[in-house]
Amino acid sequence: MTLQHTLQRGRAAVRYGREHGLVALARLVRHRVRHTGAPFAKIDVIGFYSFVRGEPFGKPWCDGEVARNTVNWVVPPFGRGSGGHLNIFRFVKHLEDEGFQCRVIVSGEPRPQSPERCAEQIRDWFFPLKASVHLGMENAPSAHVTIATGWQTAYAVRDFRSTKHRCYFVQDFEPAFYPLGSEYAFAEETYRFDFIGITAGNWLAQRLAADYGMVTHAVGFSYDRERYRPLHRREPETRRVFFYARPPTARRAFELGLLVLDEVTRRLPDVKVILAGWDVSGYEIPFEHLNCGILDLDELPDLYSQCDVGLVLSFSNLSLLPLELMACGVPVVSNRAPCTEWLLNDHNARLASPTVEALADAVCEVFEDRALAARLRTAGLATASCTDWRAEAARMGEVLRNLDATEDLLEVGT
């Protein structure tokens, strides 16, 4: 690329940033790097999205070829700390305890170095599993059940012939990760593949059933009881609010959160802000704060226990964060919406409209009203204690065991 061409691209980037904002510019650069490995290289759109074209592969399914307890989990490539993969591998581990023979198939790029190295990473970063690891759907073994775990993997599962049942473990409404356009449409289309949906929570189950006619079964969230619990607080005279600050994840409302916290610290100048989830040193943040960046899981309980309020914003399905904060005795403030109210309510959290004023009011109210804070802390602990990962895995196992009967009922219905 010539210097003149580079300068032209740079000026175009500046114009784009001025018109659409710095966050949008950062997302554009990330999009180009993800597709090409370089911010200004040509993008091979057709090659990158060729997987959406239907092309069946694999040996046709034959009844009796494999045991009914065999399950293929098709996952996208992962890195250390991926919350979505943490949930997936947790269910794999519990289903193995339930008697299922699980396999993990990594579909997509970049591929891990080798199946053996990938298995080591799963063990070291997530959980020790008995499951065999396979790289690429072309190397997937036959299975009674094959489960997609993200919209890109759903296309691979759709085309995989060596399975009797196709399921879809849906943790969030993934079209909402993108602006209205091609990727939104690609992700949304996967809900019309006639997979059996196993969803994280009731909100997703109801939405996918109502909008796409998907047969769905909801499983709930829980938390790691060995990790998250109330710890002794230091410096009780200091008031702190925790915020999950992750600018690249638009649905977690980083911009709204900063505005809310700015208003809170204007009203209550002694409040200290704790930010974690991403390195935000490149952002102008005028109030006093601690930029924790990305932390190891073992560091979180102590951090949470130092805080008086946890601000959790979500414009799609909730993460595990609200339950983890509750388990550490932290009152939760969140935006009121169907995607949050399947777990949070006016008893166990302080919910408010998604505006700066309303959310700042809510955070300040928890700081100022000791009775409210105590009530939310008690209710949050009770909500968390009522959840159990093993019970949710048993519920998922029951769904998988009954797939043959479910298919018979669906055939009768048609």
Image: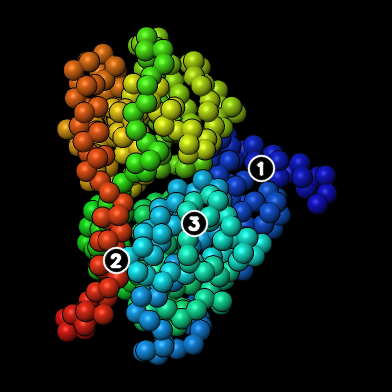
The tag earlier along the polypeptide, 3 or 1, is 1
State which mark lies toward you, 1 or 2. Answer: 2
Residue 174: in sight, yes or no? no
Badge 3 amino acid: Pro
List the residue tagged with mark 3: 128
Badge 1 marks a residue whose secondary structure is helix
The tag earlier along the polypeptide, 2 or 3, is 3
State the image coordinates of residue 366 (x, y, percent, origin top left): 26, 20
Q: CA distance from mark 1 to mark 2?
A: 52 Å
Badge 1 amino acid: Ala
Left/right of residue 287 with respect to residue 98 in the rendered view: right
Q: Residue at x 73, y 44 (%)?
A: 8
In the picture, the disc for residue 12 is 1
Badge 3 marks a residue whose secondary structure is loop
State the image coordinates of residue 284 (x, y, percent, origin top left): 55, 23
The answer to the question of whether label 3 and label 1 lie on touching residues, with beta carbons closer than 8 A, is no
State the image coordinates of residue 300 (x, y, percent, origin top left): 45, 33
| Between 326 and 58, the one nearer to me in the picture | 326
List the residue tagged with mark 2: 397
Relative height, residue 355 to residue 36 (above, below)? above
The tag earlier along the polypeptide, 1 or 2, is 1
The answer to the question of whether label 2 and label 3 lie on touching residues, with beta carbons closer than 8 A, is no
Left/right of residue 248 with respect to residue 207 in the rendered view: right
Number of residues whose C-alpha sits closer than 10 Å to that of mark 3, classed few (under 14), some (14–19) or many (20 or more): some
